[in-house]
Image: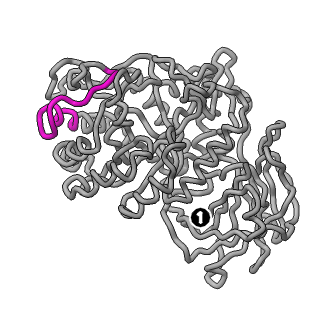
């Protein structure tokens, strides 16, 4: 629990003596980054092979919705600072990705866009709302100021103005009126450019935009909150004839364009439709995926073949939250299994060519909102404004807990490093991060039974590259999940999860 006068922080990493480790342990029983030291045992073996190179990392982060910003600013100012530093500073997770809804989404107090004046094809009435100028923009400025790493912002629209839609409604089944190349599609494409223009006036520039948040949602009858439907073919044509040209012919030509931004079960079909079209493909840089229907869209059948077909386009996990399904409770304070779900998803994605992972709301209230359609979900940080406090949930520590970093090896020590595990440091249901260093070969070690994800955002910085990691027969008999990365500075990071 954090308040105006206290919040736990992460100490700077100092490599221990050869043959020893430093363990930072958190547990369901109440430990939070508790530090201890020890010596390695030679039981489980993971071997890092840096000659095997895979995808490079873009980063990790979360989303600044209206609701998230409202919750942060509902706290006393010093508590606000603690919360933001927990995410963005060297004392915290060092997030480098921030996703931003373009105008409203369900995690707003009401539905709105930036130009709700009918038939304003020139967008003369386009204007940011108070939710931008008084909430999201000030929050972003504070995050940028406390981050030592560059922050990559990317924006996603939920809906166009209703006068552009076939439904003439924010909700329910509806697409853009007309067809690609017409005045509705041109105006909607120019809306993206105006959004980027207005944020640039506040000294905020964007790394990327997605073509639409969950475009399949707008093809569903009675969909309950903001949406705009596109089939893959419609998105292809909109990008080729309208959005792509609008971006490259503007001052924002370096802003990258991400397609899909929807559940991965649409892959590889969606990518094939868009990227096999030369005109559309020339404007596209990456593919965004959500996790909500992962249980019916296995990664080996969706993401992997997409990467194999289109290896030059990055794949980024752009949204995840727990509590969205009808069978799930919205907020469960202290739920350790929800942290495990985050870690499992991150590792599964990283091991299958995904370049990063973005959480949904940075902070929500005790109900899991506010949300204008009561579509409440859980969050790594839960705010109790009445008490002036916020809770760092297990999901927070899973997003930023386990770390193992070894010093950069010399050229003679590459390409293979042996990582020896030691049993019995943590029981299932506990988690820790271990830092170890030893002489080569065979004394660089990490525990085999840690139960958390890496400090992914903190210790797998942008530009890190996934490398080979081979498990011994003994370690394959455990419940471990793992991955390894070579950082730009030459250090090796190994991530281990025991569910």
Front residue of this view, candidates 233 and 146: 233
Disc 1: which residue:
485
Q: Is residue 10 left or right of residue 356?
A: right
Assign the magenta stretch its main secondary structure: loop
Q: Is residue 485 above or below residue 226?
A: below
Find residue 299 and report its horizontal and vertical position in percent.
50, 53
Tell me the magenta residue range.
170-190
Asked whether the viewer can see residue 72, the reply is no
Asked whether the viewer can see residue 128, the reply is yes
Front residue of this view, candidates 44 and 408: 44
Q: Is residue 124 left or right of residue 18?
A: left
Seen from this angle, which residue lies furthest bottom?
412
Seen from this angle, which residue lies furthest top?
386
Could you tell me which residue is drawn at 55 percent across and 29 percent down?
A: 325
Front residue of this view, candidates 122 and 370: 370
User: Is residue 183 one of those drawn in magenta?
Assistant: yes
User: Is residue 394 one of those drawn in magenta?
Assistant: no
Q: Is residue 374 above or below residue 297?
A: above
User: Quadrant location of the N terminus?
Assistant: top right
- The quadrant where residue 81 appears: top right
Could you tell me which residue is drawn at 63 percent across and 18 percent down?
A: 385
| Element class at badge 1 | strand
Could you tell me which residue is drawn at 26 percent across and 24 percent down?
A: 161
- How would you rate the neighbour count of disc 1 (Cα within 10 Å): few for under 14, some for 14-19, many for 20 or more? many
Q: Is residue 421 left or right of residue 141?
A: right
Q: Is residue 216 left or right of residue 63?
A: left
Find residue 134 and report its horizontal and vertical position in percent.
43, 23
Q: How many marks?
A: 1
Front residue of this view, candidates 422 and 401: 422
Q: Is residue 141 above or below residue 24?
A: above
Find residue 113 and report its horizontal and vertical position in percent.
31, 24
């Amino acid at each position: 629990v954090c308040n105006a006068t206290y919040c736990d922080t992460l100490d700077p990493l100092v490599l221990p003596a050869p043959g020893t480790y430093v363990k930072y342990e958190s547990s369901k029983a109440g430990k939070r980054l508790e530090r201890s030291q020890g010596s390695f045992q030679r039981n489980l073996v993971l071997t890092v092979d840096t000659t095997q190179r895979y995808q490079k990392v873009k980063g990790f982060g979360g989303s600044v919705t209206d609701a998230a910003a409202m919750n942060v600013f509902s706290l006393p100012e010093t508590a606000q600072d603690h919360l933001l530093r927990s995410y963005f500073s060297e004392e915290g997770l060092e997030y480098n990705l921030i996703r931003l809804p373009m105008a409203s989404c369900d995690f707003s107090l009401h539905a709105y866009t930036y130009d709700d004046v009918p038939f304003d094809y020139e967008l003369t009435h386009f204007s940011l709302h108070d939710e931008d100028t008084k909430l999201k923009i000030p929050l972003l400025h504070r995050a940028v100021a406390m981050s030592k790493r560059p922050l990559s912002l990317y924006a996603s629209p939920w809906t166009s103005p209703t006068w552009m839609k076939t439904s003439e409604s924010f909700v329910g089944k509806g697409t853009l009126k007309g067809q690609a190349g017409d005045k509705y599609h041109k105006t909607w494409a120019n809306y993206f450019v105006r959004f980027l223009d207005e944020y640039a006036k506040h000294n905020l520039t964007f790394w990327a935009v997605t073509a639409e948040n969950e475009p399949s949602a707008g093809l569903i009858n009675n969909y309950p909150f903001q949406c705009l439907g596109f089939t893959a073919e419609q998105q292809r044509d909109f990008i080729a004839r309208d959005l792509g040209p609008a971006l490259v012919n503007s001052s924002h030509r370096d802003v990258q364009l991400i397609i899909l931004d929807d559940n991965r079960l649409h892959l590889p079909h969606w990518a094939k439709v868009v990227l096999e079209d030369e005109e559309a493909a020339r404007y596209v840089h990456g593919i965004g995926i959500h996790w909500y229907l992962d249980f019916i869209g296995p990664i080996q059948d969706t993401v992997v073949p997409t990467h194999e077909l289109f290896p030059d386009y990055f794949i980024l996990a752009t949204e995840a939250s727990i509590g969205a399904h009808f069978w799930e409770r919205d907020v469960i304070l202290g739920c350790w299994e929800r942290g495990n779900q985050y870690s499992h998803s991150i590792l599964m994605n990283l091991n299958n060519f995904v370049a990063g992972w973005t959480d949904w709301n940075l902070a929500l209230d005790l109900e899991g909102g506010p949300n204008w359609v009561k579509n409440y979900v859980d969050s790594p940080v839960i705010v109790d404004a009445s008490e002036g406090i916020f809770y760092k949930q297990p999901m927070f520590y899973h997003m930023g807990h386990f770390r193992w970093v070894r010093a950069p090896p010399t050229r003679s020590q590459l390409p293979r490093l042996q990582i020896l595990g030691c049993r019995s440091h943590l029981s299932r249901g506990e988690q820790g991060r271990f830092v170890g260093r030893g002489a080569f070969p065979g004394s660089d070690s990490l525990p085999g039974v840690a139960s958390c994800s890496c400090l992914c955002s903190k210790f797998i910085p942008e530009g890190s590259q996934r490398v080979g990691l081979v498990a011994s027969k003994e370690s394959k008999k455990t419940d471990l999940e793992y991955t390894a990365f070579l950082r730009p500075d030459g250090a090796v990071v190994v991530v281990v999860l025991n569910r």
